[in-house]
């Protein structure tokens, strides 16, 4: 058990609130929470969109990781309040809630995404960075403002907060509040993404779920009386993935972004990327020598500013992909299956014949920026456990036919992306285009 | 009467929709509307926040001018639908709705803010640009994609659309749908800003207002049966100004932004602004030689990237103000009146004694980025007219005591802004600070 | 094909609106719709609750069948508007929408529940009445105000409206708008019951479903692009049944109501039911001689007034059950299965030993006032058909794994109901109660 | 100070919740609260509509006094929670919150409307009953279940609860939570009536108001930082009165109800009211000898059942008014002023000439079932006090120009009600009607 006695916990003289469209108000009671929000590293999250390219499909979804982060903090705060009121621990082995864990839980909740960078998943894919490692680094590196604030609590507090995020913190309840099948993170993003996209698929009864959540020796469990609310949450998550997170147009813009960054990296290797302007902040990444400071310089606006500069590049592919991304000209796409995958090579050849380099102008894609997060009943993926009146536990899919039905189901469709020009609607391009291309497309599938 | 017979109006084979949190769906039926949305100039609005610095107070308000623009389009579309169904014109002088005006109204609605730049009002103040002139230029200049799309309708169509925005278009109804006391613009932003800030002050009964709106010879009037809905709209607007648009913290961040840009401009005059990176896109503005292309390069992200570069400037004031802006460290402020204005000079001197240049570290401010838009009963400000059962017209404040009460009321408070350090909470700064400073502040007023 | 040429369709000089919490406004354009709403038979629906006893579990759900009926009308009206705009018929065999069908569709929608009586399903069970037959009778009987209004359209109009409700009307589209797997009726009640109970399980995207609904030769089909919205509707319905309509406490109150009416009927046979007051309006039903007029006299308030009178009955069982119903003292219940059903007889004996007549104080119940309405992929139950881009049709569960998972699933649980007193919390009753009773209950199941 | 030491406060083993559309959940922690809800007198509130005849204008507003009562309880519970967390009293004179007051506050909140009867205000007007006296009687009379439950706490507890309602309870804070300008009662009904009518005029920011509410020596005050939220509440109330509570059609139905009950009473005096059925429960009131038991028998359904019986009365006026009420055929109305009041006599004569007894078929009405509740800055009406940073108090209208504008304003309009038949739209009646009648009506005013 980590010793927490020497923590220096300062409360604000008067509780502060932030107005929030999802939780109405975010309540701040600790000085350290307010100070963390005021750090440079945390404010930077205001300049990074929560949903990457999704706002190019759902225009309302322009919210930032800042907004989501304070929301995860607020849900965690409410969980602590409910736990300490209803399930206060009286001894270290009773499996109930020890409110001394509150501050570490709140800080981990607030900071769980602090390492995210601009267009995270694509960026990481191209430049081999990792937002989870960055999160730990920002928390534990002595050069950050976040670290300085955390150290005011105690010397080992940064390490404790980081260990919650890496799931090595000894108290399972704290870990699972921040990261498990029903955690503060997922609950906030479903509600928030639903609100900002203007879809209602992601809505579920947060109040009821918080009410049936309980600390236990095993971590966090849910009272059987809330089974339907939990079920509704799982279905909502399933629907948000199908309808928002995996939307083909967002994935298409992600493909363009990926190819754009890849092209820049490829050009930088051969010293062909001239524009000093467009590369100043990215140089360390091209050279594989980026440090934390370099990483913290980047945000969506900085990357977009590079792309703006690349519009004027001598390299036609770079300039074209930059414009396609900034001006939102998505690739078209079509579903394919194991049976029709053999058509991809001929199609790529037709794309090449039309003058588009297939390496930069086509893609196969069966995943997305946000890896799918489906419910599984297997132990290692984090089961949801329901507690019966007599204290016995049941795994969710064992009692819910609805959840059983969607448990572990594969959801993503495989898609082939290609330039819209291949469809030949534009007379000029038509001359270049092999008319055979269109004949392979029917009802959004390859045939 | 402008001739509209030669317009080339193409409908989409199938109506398209955009999902929208405010209007549920945005319906697009004309090819020209879809094409305008797909232009570079319009997509650029995705990278400019609707509310400038307000999201630094209300963190949810991160929505862009893109979002608002499609909303104004949608309200206009609905108005046209209702007008053509209920009040179709049968002859040019009957004061009813001629649906040939639909396309020019829709285009003007969609493009009314196309000329907005990054942090518009502050930027304009420092660099003498004007977003309304820019709007006209983008619509009428032959170099823009927007202009090319509009010209496909007819050669004089761009000029027509521009004339709606400059209010010289002959049909008053069209002009007033886009710009009047109760127009599509204001109705969308009240609802949208209310939704994204998470306050509910701006909500009013849009459906009912659209239902009681009527075309008339005088322009747009409202059926007396909807008086209470109109009243509620006026009160909502009043409350949004008081509580959101004029929030002291947003104004404080605006002050910092203003001083930051001013400092950069001042330094550029004396060639002291070294960073090529941070000035590339701003150079034409420093030199007073910006053309449309230079203007269109700018967005919030580009400016923030400049600020990011300025953090490293040798000029301490520039570097400090850039950090204050990016990391959200607002100035403090206090209300003053005609009676207490004499205290400002002594206070500024104390600020100077503490080592802060008052030109860059203090401000008096009685207005805001968004000029206040109060209802006035005077003719030239655009009265709201209610139509009685017998066809006679009454001005709103003549029949609504509630509106009369707030008509023409001055709302803005005068505030004096100064560095938080003057309050001396930080021990180190305390030594510099004149303790007399604090004694002049009580209950948010100067005394 | 029914001739509709001689219909006399009068429009209101000015559209009327009713304010509605679900649809915002209900728009009335035809004189006949307004006149139908103003009939005695339709106004009577204000005094009959939509959800019977559900408000005794979800206190907010006090809405009437009146409210639901105007909602079904409004959804139907919107469907007609969308159909005539997007899919107008040009010849009788094109499978598109003939707007001459609008009025019969609107009237059928408005009147589809006009035959419902007080606490319909229980009442029907005891007195062998049938609300669907009553609906047809009210529409076609010349003694009603409803019939008089309908006849103003044409002599055979009442019969046409009735035939939509009995599903014999020749135009399948009209029939399926009013009654099919996704019809105006179900769509309104899911949204409305969700709103009034304060749960959000029943919410789905009505606008989107209306947008993808299409007339076809087969009746009503849905565009494949709306598959997820349709899926969400099916899941919402599934959840509302599990969580609201089948709630054990509502079913328990339904059991008490059933036994109360049965007791009154049993007593009336042996002339033991003295209270003239409590039986005046029920007498014709006890005697099996109720006519339409007698039926129309009844509403929730009239029945409750009888129960109020029965509180004072000499018959202890009648008086006790009346009080339990009016004062909301539900029976307790426990789930049983085929395996544990053998325990029911012994339990009933214990109830008898405790002094409660098991005929009136216990019940087995595996259904509910609202018969469950699950989605089935079988043809005769009304499939949901999705139309692909190329015009081919797919049955919903064939393309949606989520719907397949819940298709045809049995949902109701079997429950045994018994007096709360059997649990012996009250010392006095304890003496009477066999302590063995409690030992058979665990985790809400019989063991 | 009342001694509260001997109170017997039992908590439920596990908190119970009721689902509520306004407050999401109602939380019940005390056995006495659960027991009060389960009493016959409280359950009876389910059968009495909160808004009397308003659902005849806004059909969604069918909610009962039961629903409102649990809502007032819940708001009070939340106030107590906030007060004890933020402002706990340490000594009897510090003006802070003593949580020993919680139970009396909760019971008074729950029971504040327990004495309301069917169609309260009209009923009281005709039969000289008084719902506030009834409330006190139900609480303090030893024959009620409510009283029995309260006595379990302590012998003087019923008297204490009653004294909160009569405002004689010594702790001003408790009294003002239940009844003052911003109390739990008004806050619940504005939100609830707004939700159920489907208007949004009554919505305001409850969370924020609860957050700025503070106990003080003077009773309840509000932090100056919440001034705008308080202002918004006052404006919402003003708008709900104008648009919902004072709606002319609801008032018209109230007039018919008033005349119907008056006619029955008049007939009962002369023994002309034959129907035993229709008078059984009303008899004690006709005879001026109603006791508490007689009062508790009545609810909306019982009265409507009387009206149903009166439909068949030999007295034509009684039968006609009963049908008009049950079948919702409102009188028409027109505004009049001091200037046009002289026209009323001639109009009444025309009504008489047309065969309608003006005593039962016309009315002047300048008030309503719900007496108007406007904000006044006068001390005796209960000022709203705002507390400044330095602890000084300001009266609301002194700092809010918006509230000042509507403070003490007279709102009700005077209307003259008459049978719709006077407008002569129906050919048959036309013969009877003086055509002069219509000439006096213009733009909803008498001229």
Image (spheres, coloured by chain):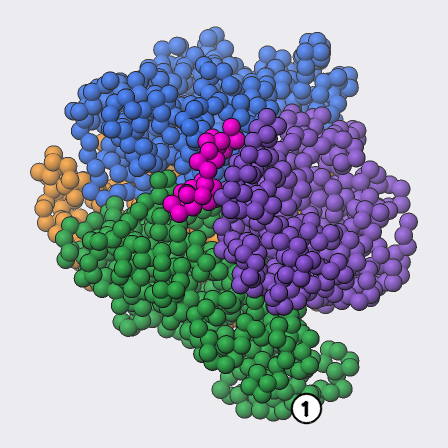
Chain colours: A orange, B blue, C green, D purple
Considering depth in this image, is A40 or B67 the residue closer to the camera? Answer: B67
Q: Mark yes or no: residue D7 visible.
A: yes
Q: Residues within 10 Å of mark 1 (few under 14, many from 20)?
A: some
In the visual, does B254 lie left or right of B48?
A: right
Q: What residue is shown with label 1?
A: C353
Q: Nearer the viewer, residue A205 or C358?
A: C358
Label 1: element kind: helix
For residue A148, which quarter of the picture? top right
* Residue A420 position within the rendered picture, expressed as x and y whole percent measured from the top left: 21, 42
Location of residue A360 with respect to B167 vertically, above or below? below
Q: Is residue B376 above or below residue C168?
A: above
Q: Specify the subunit that label 1 lies on.
A: C
Residue at point 57%, 23% (across, down): B404
Q: Give residue D244's quadrant in the image.
A: top right
The answer to whether C44 appears left or right of D40 in the picture is: left
The residues colored magenta run D421-447
Residue at image location 30% in from the left, 17% down from the top: B170
């Amino acid at each position: 058990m980590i010793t927490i006695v020497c923590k220096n916990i300062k409360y604000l003289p008067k509780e502060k609130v932030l107005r929030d469209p999802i939780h109405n108000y975010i309540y701040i009671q600790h000085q350290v929470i307010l100070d963390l929000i005021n750090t440079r590293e945390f404010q930077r999250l205001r300049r990074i969109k929560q949903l990457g390219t999704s706002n190019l499909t759902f225009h309302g979804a322009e919210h930032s990781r800042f907004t989501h982060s304070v929301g995860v903090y607020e849900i965690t705060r409410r969980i602590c309040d409910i736990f300490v009121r209803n399930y206060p621990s009286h001894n270290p082995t009773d499996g109930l809630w020890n409110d001394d864990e509150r501050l570490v839980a709140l800080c981990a909740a607030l900071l769980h995404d602090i390492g995210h960078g601009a267009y995270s998943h694509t960026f990481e894919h191209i430049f081999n960075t990792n937002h989870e490692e960055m999160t730990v680094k920002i928390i534990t590196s002595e050069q950050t403002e976040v670290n300085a604030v955390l150290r005011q609590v105690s010397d080992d507090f940064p390490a404790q907060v980081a260990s919650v995020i890496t799931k090595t913190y000894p108290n399972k309840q704290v870990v699972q509040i921040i990261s498990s099948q029903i955690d503060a993170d997922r609950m906030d993003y479903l509600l928030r993404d639903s609100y900002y996209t203007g879809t209602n698929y992601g809505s579920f009864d947060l109040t009821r779920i918080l009410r049936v959540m309980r600390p236990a020796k095993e971590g966090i469990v849910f009272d059987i009386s809330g089974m339907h609310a939990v079920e509704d949450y799982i279905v909502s998550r399933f629907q948000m993935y199908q309808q928002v997170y995996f939307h083909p147009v967002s994935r298409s813009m992600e493909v363009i972004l990926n190819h754009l960054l890849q092209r820049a990296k490829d050009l930088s290797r051969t010293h062909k990327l001239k524009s000093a302007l467009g590369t100043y902040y990215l140089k360390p990444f091209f050279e594989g020598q980026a440090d934390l400071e370099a990483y913290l310089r980047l945000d969506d606006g900085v990357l977009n500013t590079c792309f703006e500069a690349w519009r004027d590049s001598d390299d036609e592919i770079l300039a074209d992909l930059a414009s396609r991304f900034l001006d939102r000209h998505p690739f078209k796409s079509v579903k394919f299956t194991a049976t029709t995958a053999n058509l991809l090579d001929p199609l790529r050849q037709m794309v090449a014949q039309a003058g588009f380099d297939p390496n930069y102008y086509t893609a196969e894609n069966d995943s997305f920026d946000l890896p799918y997060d489906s419910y599984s009943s297997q132990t290692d993926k984090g089961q949801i456990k329901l507690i019966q009146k007599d204290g016995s536990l049941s795994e969710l899919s064992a009692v819910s036919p609805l959840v059983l039905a969607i448990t572990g189901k594969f959801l993503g469709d495989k898609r082939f992306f290609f330039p819209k020009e291949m469809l030949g609607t534009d007379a000029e391009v038509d001359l270049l285009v092999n008319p055979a291309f269109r004949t392979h497309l029917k009802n959004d599938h390859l045939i």
